[in-house]
Amino acid sequence: MVPFTLTATAIASDPPPVVSREARIKDISSIEGIRDNQLVGYGIVVGLQGTGDSQQTTFPVQTLTSTLLRMGVSVPAASIRIQNLAAVFVAATLPPFAKPGTKLDITVSSAGDARSLEGGLLLMTPLYGADGKIYAQAQGPLVVGGYSISVNGNIKQFNHPNTARVPLGAMVERGVPLELAGRKEFSLLLNDADFRSAEAMQKAINLELGRDAARVVDSRQIDLSVANGEDIPALLAQVESVEVPVYPRAKVVVNERTGTVVIGGTVVLQPVSILHGGLAVNVVSEFQVSQPNAFSSTGTTQVVQQTRIDAQDKPVNRIELKQGATVDDLVRSLQTIGASARDVISILQAMKSAGALEAEIEVL
């Protein structure tokens, strides 16, 4: 009976404590309808020092021809040399409640084969919304966070010179109307859906306002009612400043392209024993030339391919995680056996399949 008693004690161990953190409502949620809008436009950048689009890129020539024609200058497209200009796409974000005259930051990216946008000037470019209407106009000198130098076929490049920024380079011509006056209800949307966080937000709002103003609809949406004659901007400012407990989801984020693994502190590990090895296979092909003997009239030169395969089986490494092991214990154990980022990704996925990793794995 003693082994049975010990086993029962191990199973009845205390569950891990629920971890929460305090956060403002404005940092973990948004108000439905009050959001940003994406803008995009197409234009040309001039003033480049021979680093613009090549002659094989035809649409910059067409754009320049159309621009000159609107200015009363008619130039045949065949006579235009475009090394000093580049066709670009312009992107911006229109914030809520933006009024005509508001200035926006813009991002400019090359649409052709230009080598660099350094020193360029973006000409007036209309920025369109999803409905096809013009909401802003962009123009200004580009700020490039890199460079590209090419001399006699030698190229030295730093960062990405084909993408640039223009601080306050766009001016809003039309805003997106959003009337707050007269509304009787708003919806708060959690960034991460969670019923417990939604319930905590409802209780905190009702306690702050002193009335039953908030109501949970689902794990993401909380409806907020407006009292008669209440100042809506003041109400929203008061609600957004309320701090509530948040219960983040246990998650492991994996980027297999870069080998990056981020493990959240709320991840729970179960007792598990891990055996990890590796098999390296190397295939090498060599080409040898077989030539006939001297003064031979019948032989020919032949290229013969020689292929060699080398296989190396690495020894198995063992990791044992006992009851109560933490993420820090797992990371230290993986570092001890010299596991690479790719090995860690494979081990975490195997632990998830074995039920030893109580977390959601998100692959980017």
Image (spheres, rainbow, N blue to C red):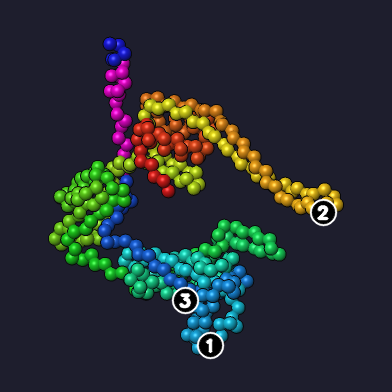
- Mark positioned earlier in the residue sequence (1 or 2): 1
Q: Nearer the viewer, mark 1 or mark 2?
A: 2
Query: Which callout, 1 or 3, points at the residue further toward the start of the chain?
Result: 1
* Three-letter residue code for mark 1: Ser
Inspect the image, locate mark 2, and give the three-letter code of the amino acid beneath it. Ser
Q: Which residues make up the magenta segment? A: 6-22
Residue bearing the label numbered 1: 74
Q: Nearer the viewer, residue 28 or 260?
A: 260
In this image, 112 relative to 304: left or right?
Answer: left
Q: Which mark is residue 297?
A: 2
Q: Residue at x 67, y 46 (%)?
A: 305
287, 72: nearer the viewer: 287
Is 274 magenta? The answer is: no
The answer to whether residue 12 is magenta is yes
What is the CA distance from the residue labelled 1 to the residue labelled 3? Answer: 19 Å
Asked whether, in this view, residue 294 is left or right of residue 300, the answer is right
Q: Residue at x 38, y 71 (%)?
A: 128
